[in-house]
Image (cartoon, rainbow, N blue to C red):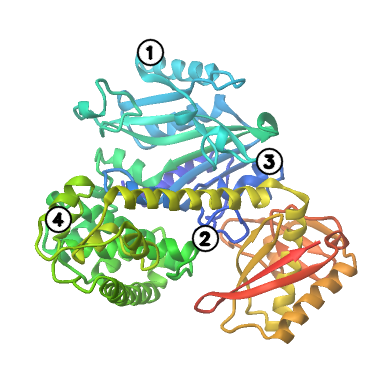
């Protein structure tokens, strides 16, 4: 059974239970200012989980391409990847626990033929005023008893750190207006021997490698308001199951990188490097990072020092570093293998292969030039630098041991942690790459600077998350409607080939990204402002309609439409001026915006521009 087989069986299973298949949303969100990448299947559905009617009804199913940047540093073990496909089914105020739990069990045991005795579950143990999930416990108890298994051995309870789900993580980290809820998870037991370095005893959430989580049913029934949790208008089900992990358990292979999906890529890395996977687990990092990079580039992102482009650059450089460390530099055969492996489910990788290859090779060359500039920076401050070479195998150990090894080598140059951080943050070199240049530094001081940098980044990300449409503040809603006016005005003035590539809306300002290959002139900026302000002055009525996809296309609505699955779409109309696919929310009349003012414009990459503006 291939990954494609599992995908099709899953979709068919839930279609037979009256679910409607919805499109795979873009990996780079088009109208979600809260995040850089789509990281879960529920992310594009937040407005509907909050109560908006979905054009396809109350029962939905799909497969969603996802990327999680926070997993970059975890890649290297046998189960974590940054890119994955999430199988998802949703109930928007329709069925709940009594249906969801038995259905997933049926899919696992009847469709995928997984042995019941290999399956374990976890259930929410309660948090503050939210009670322990005894309802799920009783459902699971009956399921296990019906197949002759001892439920007491199979059901495990955990707190919010394991069995609570929201986009922001723990309840205390959730911003106002964010939905979340308890979950129940299913684990597969590979039966491997427990490694006691992970604890005296084993359990489903143990990291020793015996258990693998394969599905998570979230009961999305709460929203955070005024620091507490209130019931949502509807009790929702949000299920997610990683396709790559389901393939691993179907094949009884506890190393995801040795499944039929990824092992051909690993074999290509072995062939390219002349090394064996058994002795070089860096191949996991190489494989994952080039897979993720291929999908990100296929979504028209290019390496840069900002946002999605920065993440892509980090992935590519880390992949290039690890490939170099095991003796190779030719990435083309690896990229070809990736495109071949995903062709049945993601034709875009084949269609855009030449672009993907070109971007990777260009970044690889640019990275070499960056390294040369980094060397020049160091040699200017430390004239004796560059006479030594620290082997990457030694330098990659880090900590005091790595420092001691470096100090003992002839010709090694000691640099300050501050300069090491400049090489890391400005020149994009990893700590291992810095050391491979024959440089050593205080590891503890460098780690402290990294931690400070991460704290600042997290604070910025939290602000970005809280300041997006998820907060539904009036100022954000004004900004959201203004982006629709701006989008149409750009097309009027620059041509209808211009389209939105991203946005970010806070209560302080709006940011709008679009494709255009040169700076806007002062006259064009003024025309944009005047056009938007004229539409504000006209006090146009804003409303939405659920209309057939064909009609939306025929009337010229702007947006991303998937002709294959979605039969109806939600289109917001601003008078007769703007028609755009969107989930909302918006003002009722444009006069509520009062005033639109462009603050500045900037380039964010080849052929891409960004406008900052204020409203009100």
Which residue carries the number 2 mark? 28
What residue lies at 74% left-to-right and 52% top-to-bottom? Answer: 585
Q: Position of residue 267 (x, y in %)?
A: 18, 58
Q: Residue 162 location, x and y as percent? A: 44, 30
Which residue is the site of mark 4? 407
Q: Residue at x 40, y 75 (%)?
A: 355
In the rendered image, the vertical position of residue 329 relative to residue 470, given as above or below: below
Disc 2 element: loop
Q: Is residue 521 above or below residue 482?
A: below
Residue located at (83% from left, 72% from top)? 533
Label 4, secondary structure: give it: helix
Name the foreground residue: 454 vs 173: 454
Q: In the rendered image, which quarter is residue 535 located in?
A: bottom right
Q: Of label 2 and label 4, which has the lower sequence position?
A: 2
Residue marked by disc 1: 152
Q: Are marks 1 and 2 in contact (CB under 8 Å)?
A: no
Q: Position of residue 337 (x, y in %)?
A: 27, 64
Given contact means CB atoms under 8 Å apart, are the residues at marks 2 and 3 in contact? Answer: no
Q: Tell me if label 3 and label 4 are in contact, CB under 8 Å.
A: no
Q: Is residue 291 above or below residue 243?
A: below
Q: Distance of mark 1 from mark 2, alpha carbons?
A: 43 Å
Is 35 situated left or right of 431 in this image?
Answer: right
Q: Is residue 532 left or right of residue 448?
A: right
The earlier-in-sequence mark between 2 and 3 is: 2
The image position of residue 65, as x and y in percent, is 46, 54
- Pair 3/4: label in front: 4
Cα separation between marks 1 and 4: 55 Å
């Amino acid at each position: 059974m291939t990954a494609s087989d599992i995908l099709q069986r899953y979709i068919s299973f839930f279609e037979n239970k009256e679910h409607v298949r919805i499109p795979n949303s873009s990996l780079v969100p088009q109208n979600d200012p809260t995040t850089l990448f789509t990281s879960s299947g529920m992310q594009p559905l937040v407005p509907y989980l909050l109560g908006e009617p979905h054009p396809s009804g109350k029962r939905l199913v799909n497969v969603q391409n996802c990327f999680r940047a926070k997993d970059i540093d975890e890649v290297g073990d046998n189960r974590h990847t940054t890119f994955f496909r999430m199988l998802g089914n949703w109930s928007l105020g329709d069925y709940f626990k009594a249906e969801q739990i038995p259905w997933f069990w049926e899919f696992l045991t009847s469709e995928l033929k997984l042995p019941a005795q290999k399956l374990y579950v976890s259930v929410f143990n309660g948090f503050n005023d939210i009670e322990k999930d005894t309802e799920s416990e009783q459902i699971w108890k009956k399921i296990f008893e019906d197949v002759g298994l001892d439920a007491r051995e199979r059901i495990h309870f955990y707190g919010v750190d394991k069995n609570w789900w929201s986009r922001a993580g723990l309840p205390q980290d959730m911003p106002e207006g964010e939905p979340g809820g308890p979950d129940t998870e299913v684990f597969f037991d590979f039966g491997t021997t427990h490694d006691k370095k992970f604890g005296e005893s084993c359990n489903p959430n143990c990291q020793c490698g015996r258990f693998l989580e394969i599905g998570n049913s979230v009961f999305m029934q709460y929203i955070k308001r005024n620091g507490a949790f209130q019931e949502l208008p509807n009790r929702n089900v949000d299920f997610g199951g990683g396709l790559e992990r389901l393939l691993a358990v179907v094949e009884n292979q506890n190393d995801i990188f040795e499944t039929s999906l990824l092992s051909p890529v690993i074999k290509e890395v072995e062939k390219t490097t002349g090394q064996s996977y058994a002795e070089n687990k860096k191949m996991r990092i190489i494989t994952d990072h080039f897979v993720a990079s291929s999908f990100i580039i296929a979504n028209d992102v290019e390496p840069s020092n900002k946002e999605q482009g920065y993440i892509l650059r980090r992935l590519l450089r880390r992949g290039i570093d690890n490939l170099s460390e095991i003796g190779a530099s030719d990435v083309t055969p690896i990229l070809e293998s990736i495109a071949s492996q995903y062709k049945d489910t993601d034709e875009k990788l084949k269609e855009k292969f030449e672009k993907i290859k070109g971007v990777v090779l260009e970044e690889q060359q640019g990275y070499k030039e960056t390294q040369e500039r980094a060397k020049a920076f160091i040699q200017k401050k430390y004239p004796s630098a560059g006479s030594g070479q620290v082997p990457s195998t030694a330098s990659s150990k880090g900590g005091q041991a790595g420092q001691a090894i470096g100090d003992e080598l002839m010709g090694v140059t000691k640099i300050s942690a501050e300069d090491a951080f400049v090489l890391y943050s400005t020149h994009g070199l990893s700590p291992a790459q810095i050391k491979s240049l024959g440089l050593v530094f205080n590891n503890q001081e460098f780690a402290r600077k990294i931690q400070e940098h991460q704290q600042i980044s997290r604070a910025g990300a939290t602000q970005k998350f809280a300041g997006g449409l998820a907060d539904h503040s009036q100022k954000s809603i004004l900004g959201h409607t203004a982006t629709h006016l701006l989008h149409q005005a750009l097309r009027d003035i620059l041509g209808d080939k211009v389209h939105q590539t991203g946005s970010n809306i806070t209560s302080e300002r709006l940011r709008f990204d679009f494709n255009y290959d040169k700076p806007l002139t002062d006259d064009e900026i003024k025309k944009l402002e005047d056009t938007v302000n004229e539409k504000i002055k006209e006090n146009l009525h804003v409303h939405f309609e659920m209309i057939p996809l064909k009609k939306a296309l025929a009337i010229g609505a702007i947006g991303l439409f998937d002709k294959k699955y979605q039969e109806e779409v939600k289109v917001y109309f601003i008078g007769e001026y703007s028609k755009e696919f969107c989930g909302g929310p918006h003002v009722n009349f444009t006069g509520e915006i009062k005033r639109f003012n462009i603050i500045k414009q900037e380039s964010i990459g080849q052929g891409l521009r960004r406008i900052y503006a204020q409203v009100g």
